[in-house]
Image: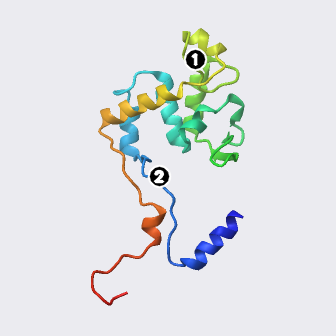
């Protein structure tokens, strides 16, 4: 069904580029990423490792929170992202730097299941945690770090902005 709709759109708008982007998405570059992970704005190791992992793997917040130790395939250098957008599973490449960072981070908390366990109860509590980091806490920390780095949200064009032709101001012209 999805492919049929895409084919219909291509027939109706052959020259239009369909891009679906939310106006609330935030895109960061290498310089902003370095500012976030430099340690000047967040001192909590679990958040720093989490933000680095999200950026290096290109994950959404919920996908990163759901990562488990068994999802890391070091032999094939990939990560199994479960229940991604559209409830689909996908594999993403695992950079070597991210793999080493995740190994060092796991040696600190040693939770047998969760890659990012909640921090209630300290390190001993993290080893026995059954829930991941708090989503609200991660969002609040990322918002504060972004403000500290001077990042602002940038809006992207929606499908309606890219699928329509500009209207000319001259009468009679099409």
Quarter occupied by residue 118: top right
Q: Residue at x 55, y 41 (%)?
A: 60
Which residue is at a point 68% across and 63% down the rendered structure image? 2
Task: Identify which residue is drawn at 53% across, 29% down.
Answer: 135
State if disc 1 and disc 2 touch (CB < 8 Å): no
Estimate the x, y position of residue 63 in percent, counting from the top left. Answer: 60, 38
165 relative to 78, above or below: below
Looking at the image, is mark 2 or mark 1 earlier in the sequence? 2
Colouring scheme applied when the structure was drawn: rainbow
As drawn, the label of residue 71 is none
Circle 2 — which element?
Answer: loop
Position of residue 44 relative to residue 25, above or below, is above
Q: Is residue 67 above or below residue 23?
A: above
Residue receiving disc 1: 108
Q: Position of residue 136 (x, y in %)?
A: 49, 28
- Position of 57 compared to 128: left or right? left
Q: Which residue is mark 2?
A: 22
The quarter of the picture where residue 127 lies is: top right
């Amino acid at each position: 069904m999805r492919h049929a709709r895409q084919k219909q759109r291509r027939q109706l708008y052959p020259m239009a580029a369909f891009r679906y982007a939310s106006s609330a998405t935030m895109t960061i570059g290498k310089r902003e990423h370095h500012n976030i992970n430099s340690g000047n704005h967040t001192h909590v190791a679990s958040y720093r490792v989490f933000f680095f992992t999200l950026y290096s793997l290109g994950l959404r917040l919920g996908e990163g929170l759901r990562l488990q130790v068994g999802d890391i395939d070091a032999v094939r250098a990939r990560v199994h992202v479960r229940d991604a957008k559209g409830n689909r599973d996908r594999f993403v490449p695992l950079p070597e730097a991210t793999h080493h960072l995740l190994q060092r981070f796991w040696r600190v908390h040693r939770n047998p299941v969760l890659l990012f366990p909640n921090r209630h109860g300290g390190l001993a509590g993290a080893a026995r945690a059954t829930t991941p980091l708090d989503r609200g806490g991660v969002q609040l920390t990322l918002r504060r770090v972004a403000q500290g780095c001077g990042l602002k949200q940038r809006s992207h064009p929606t499908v309606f902005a890219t699928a329509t032709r500009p209207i000319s101001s001259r009468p009679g012209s099409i």
